[in-house]
Amino acid sequence: METKHIHISDYDYPLPDERIAKFPIAERDHSKLLVYNKGEISTDAFYHLPSYLPSGTLMVYNNTKVIQARIHFHKETGALIEVFLLEPARPRDYELMFQSSGQCAWLCMIGNLKKWKEGSLKQTVTVKGRTLTLTATRGQLCGTSHWVDFRWDDSEVSFAELLDAVGELPIPPYLNRATEESDKQTYQTVYSKIKGSVAAPTAGLHFTPRVLADLDAAGVEREELTLHVGAGTFKPVKSELIADHTMHTEYISVSRRTIERLIAHQAKATAVGTTSVRTLESLYYMGAKLESQPDLTEEQLHVSQWEPYEQVSGISPVQALRNLEDWLHRQQLDVLHSSTQIIIAPGYDYKIVNRLITNFHQPKSTLLLLVSAFVKGDWKRIYDYALANGFRFLSYGDSSLLIP
């Protein structure tokens, strides 16, 4: 398989620190928009996006909400320990997790781990005028994550409320600055609503109620899905060959209604962000599996990293989506909950996404590989143009509309 033999060093480019946007601009939709239209490149403003999308286009975006995933504890010795929530462990369901009262468990990254050899960490918290004690106890190592049990002595307080009081929003490490109060608003999309991400789906940060209203007026149809972005999205590719890089697992939720809308649009969609891309493209492989194994469970629908390159399926994207729709009907479910480890890199054949709205990504990242696959290897010309024309890069930076 050619894709596995890709050298990540071929996807490097010089990114001066001053080109990384440390803060967003004052008005989200006044960010710059690079338009790549069948090889032609031009500059516009994001609020003109609706004029580039034909009436009847289906746009799909990720409605995940960033949680305040960093919790800081001080040991009696004065040592600062950071517990970074990665994914729910008990209960595993995100919705049930945030409703938990009294106790729950997460898989976490731990900062300053060497100073937390044993015992529990404690801190006093005030939530809704009530004072309580939050305790964290470290459990076993699960892969590269640590199991952490949380307990708090007030069953009237949910974990969601506790996190809002004690947690800190985890802005990306490459911003090289502390989280500020303003990030609580600016690092969320205006349509975020399902809590669970530890990083924002940043292509969505440019949207405003005005742009959404203009899209509606232009006849662009909108659907949403949920992919909870994990810390793995920032995981650098440290291996020279892509074959040696392990993709992180991400949890997705897609409603039956969204699948029906995709079918009605002949399985073609404009994706807002790489998270929407990974979800939409994963749907194809889930549906393809159901063609020969119609009774799979949600867990068995999981898309593994190399599956798209190893599973040669002759069925059409519309048929794959119909298989998913039928499966949901048989299971009497309105929402598909599953997971994906999909890696999209040059050599990948896109099934559903035919337009992409995305920011400018880090050198040598899996997100840059995804973009390269989408524009048939023409990423360097796009990034050279962006660097030469004053575009701002990464999470709080400018965006692009890619039409291959």
Image (cartoon, rainbow, N blue to C red):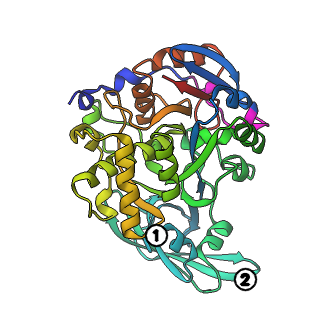
* Image location of residue 141, percent across then percent down: 33, 65
Residue 22 appearing in the image:
yes
Q: Is residue 254 above or below residue 158?
A: above
Label 1 belongs to which residue? 93
Residue at position x 74%, y 53% in the image: 181
Q: Quarter of the image containing the N terminus?
A: top left
* Image location of residue 322, percent across then percent down: 38, 51
The quadrant in which residue 53 appears is top right
The quadrant in which residue 212 appears is top right
Q: Residue 130 got which mark?
A: 2
How many C-alpha atoms fall within 10 Å of the one at disc 1: few (<14), some, or many (≥20)? few
Q: Nearer the viewer, residue 304 or 368?
A: 304
Say whether disc 2 or disc 1 marks the residue closer to the N-terminus.
1
Residue extent of the magenta highlight: 16-29
Residue 112 appearing in the image:
no
* Image location of residue 47, percent across then percent down: 74, 31
